[in-house]
Amino acid sequence: MYRPIGPMLITMNALLGSLVVLASCVMLCNAQCYFIPMEGSPDNSLKECKDLGGVTYAMNSKWKNERCEECSCNPTGIDCCNTVAIPLGFSKMKCKILFNQKTCTYTVVEKKNPKKTCLVQQWVM
């Protein structure tokens, strides 16, 4: 009796490859977040959070900071995560990166002619 093992093996390899890619993505995404624990004080209990610069935020509020990170204040502290895709796959000899603080975006342009954009093949968060 002949059992086709080839198609099943290909399916299993494809599934395993997909899981590895998904796990890598989850690890990379989580690596771009950080947590600032709540500082306990008797007069300020659970009403606001304070960031590393000393700026306070209302409990359960959300904001985007000067580094284009999305942050939120919750009872345990402040969670902040990067929201900007960073270009990696481009010619570093021919091109340079420009960052727009207002739109929180990167553009890759030619060094000799900054009006021309460069092809970017890879972006990471």
Image (cartoon, helix red, strand yellow):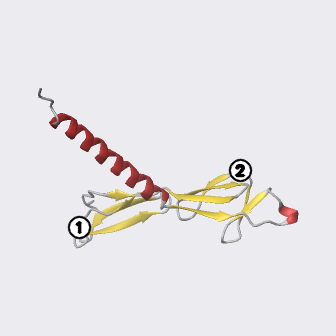
Comparing 95 with 6, the one in front is 6
Image spot of residue 96 (x, y percent) = 31, 69
Name which quarter of the figure residue 86 lies in: bottom left
* The N terminus sits in image quarter: top left
Comparing 34 with 92, the one in front is 34
* The C terminus sits in image quarter: bottom left
Mark seen at residue 54: none
Q: Nearer the viewer, mark 1 or mark 2?
A: 2
Image spot of residue 119 (x, y percent) = 24, 58
- Location of mark 1 (residue): 91
Q: Residues within 10 Å of mark 1 (few under 14, many from 20)?
A: some
Comparing 33 with 109, the one in front is 33
Kindly state the secondary structure of the residue where label 2 is placed: loop
Kindly state the secondary structure of the residue where label 1 is placed: loop
Q: Amino acid at mark 2?
A: Asn
Image spot of residue 104 (x, y percent) = 47, 58
Residue lying at 83% horizontally and 62% vertically, measured from the top left: 44
- Location of mark 2 (residue): 60
User: Label 1 vs label 2: CA separation?
Assistant: 43 Å
Name which quarter of the figure residue 8 lies in: top left
Is 5 situated left or right of 105 in this image? left
Image spot of residue 67 (x, y percent) = 53, 65
